[in-house]
Image (cartoon, helix red, strand yellow):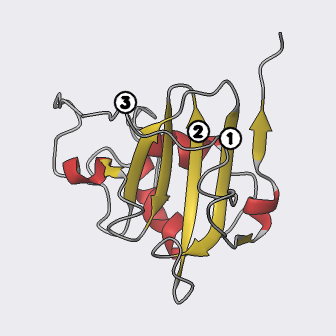
Amino acid sequence: MANGITPSSRQPESCYSYIWTGSKVEIEDTQFDQQAREYVLDITEPLPKGINIFYWLYPYNCSIAMRDFIMPWPRGIFQEAAIFQTLKYFPIAYLCCDKPEYAGLDNLSWYRNAGIDDEIEIPISLRRTEHPYWPEAPSDEENNIVGGCASARNSVHAIPKR
């Protein structure tokens, strides 16, 4: 495989593995992709310090996978931008970026030093829900700007058949 990385026995058990491998339809060689590739393909690699995985309750029946899109960071402040990836499906949504915080969301990366077989209790706030297209789409209460490259243009939005 490229860069001398060979597949290992790592199963795509983490939500980040699914975000990175499950929604990538364009070949790009960003720094984020390089770090993610090493993490996903090598069971001995810890989650890189430059990757943070945020999560929140997602009580909707649609699924969304969106990669490599740009939004302002911190949210609502239009001075700096960050590159994000998101995967949303009932009952949890995930948002990845290189920033240590995003909009007060809980961060799975707080547990980055845990072993692959460690069991951890992870709190899930049942009080915070956002609209189904948050954070990438604006709402009646706030504005947002989103941009992206080829991967962002090939995002997936799916609603189950009834």
Q: Secondary structure at mark 2?
A: strand
Q: Nearer the viewer, residue 149 or 146?
A: 146
What type is the residue that disc 2 sits on? Lys
Q: Secondary structure at mark 3?
A: loop
Local crowd at mark 3 within 10 Å, few (<14), some, or many (≥20)? few
Can you tell which mark lies on residue 126? Answer: 3
Can you tell which mark lies on residue 64? Answer: 1
Q: Distance of mark 3 from mark 1, alpha carbons? A: 20 Å
Local crowd at mark 1 within 10 Å, few (<14), some, or many (≥20)? some
Q: Distance of mark 2 from mark 3, alpha carbons? A: 16 Å
Q: Quadrant of residue 130?
A: top right
Q: Quadrant of the C terminus?
A: top right
What type is the residue that disc 3 sits on? Leu
Q: Kindly report which numbered mark, 3 or 1, lies closer to the viewer in this rendering.
A: 3
Going 67% across and 24% down the picture, which residue do you hit?
61
Q: Quadrant of the N terminus?
A: bottom right
Count up the numbered dots: 3
Tell me whether the residue at label 2 lies in contact with that at label 3, contact meaning CB atoms closer than 8 angstroms.
no
Q: Nearer the viewer, residue 105 or 100?
A: 105
- x and y percentages locating residue 58 in the rendered image: 53, 33
- x and y percentages locating residue 111 in the rendered image: 20, 47
Q: Distance of mark 2 from mark 1, alpha carbons? A: 5 Å
Vertical comparison of 75 with 90: above or below:
below
Vertical comparison of 151 with 108: above or below:
below
> Mark 2 highlights which residue?
88
Please report whichever mark, 3 or 1, sits nearer to the chain's N-terminal start: 1
Tell me whether the residue at label 2 lies in contact with that at label 1, contact meaning CB atoms closer than 8 angstroms.
yes
Please report whichever mark, 2 or 3, sits nearer to the chain's N-terminal start: 2
Question: Is residue 144 in view from this perspective?
Answer: yes
